[in-house]
Image: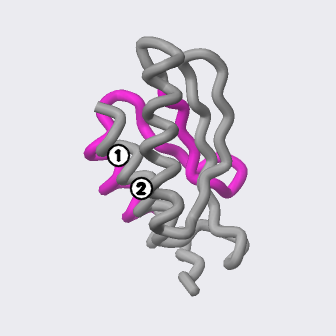
Amino acid sequence: MPNKLSDKEINHHLQLLNEKAGDNKWQIKDDKLHKTFTFKSFIRAFGWMTQIAIWAEKLKHHPEWFNVYNKVVIDLTTHDVNGISELDFELASKMEQFCS
């Protein structure tokens, strides 16, 4: 089972993750790792979600997400630890990798 990260650890991981994120940065919102991705079309957003779903299954860690047309709103948290863990940052990193 993963461990809940401290605020200091979260800030460190967030800084590293945002180095890959371009102008649209990840943030902490309501004690979750949060970001909105915008794509050129619905099919691109849905295709990206499909790729991420495969990784989520491999990691056994699933996002809270919401999709309308070309936008996908992401919230990541590890329910087993009641907070943010390294799994959240690992999945967020995959999301960044596949969004370009």
Specify the quadrant that holds the N terminus.
Answer: bottom right
How far apart, in angstroms, are the residues tagged by discs 1 and 2?
6 Å
Q: Amino acid at mark 1?
A: Asn
Q: Start and end of the magenta stretch?
A: 11-37
Q: Is residue 23 magenta?
A: yes
Instruction: Where is residue 32? Give x, y as percent.
Output: 64, 54
* Residue 39 left/right relative to 17: right
Pick the front one: 50 or 18: 50
Q: Is residue 69 visible?
A: yes
- Residue sitting at 54 percent across and 75 percent down? 6
Q: Quadrant of residue 83?
A: bottom right
* Tag 1 secondary structure: helix
* Residue at image mark 1: 18
* Residue 100 left/right relative to 26: left
Q: Amino acid at mark 2?
A: Leu
Q: Is mark 1 in CB contact (under 8 Å) with mark 2? A: yes
Q: Is residue 8 visible?
A: no
Instruction: Where is residue 16? Give x, y as percent.
Output: 30, 56
* Residue at image mark 2: 14
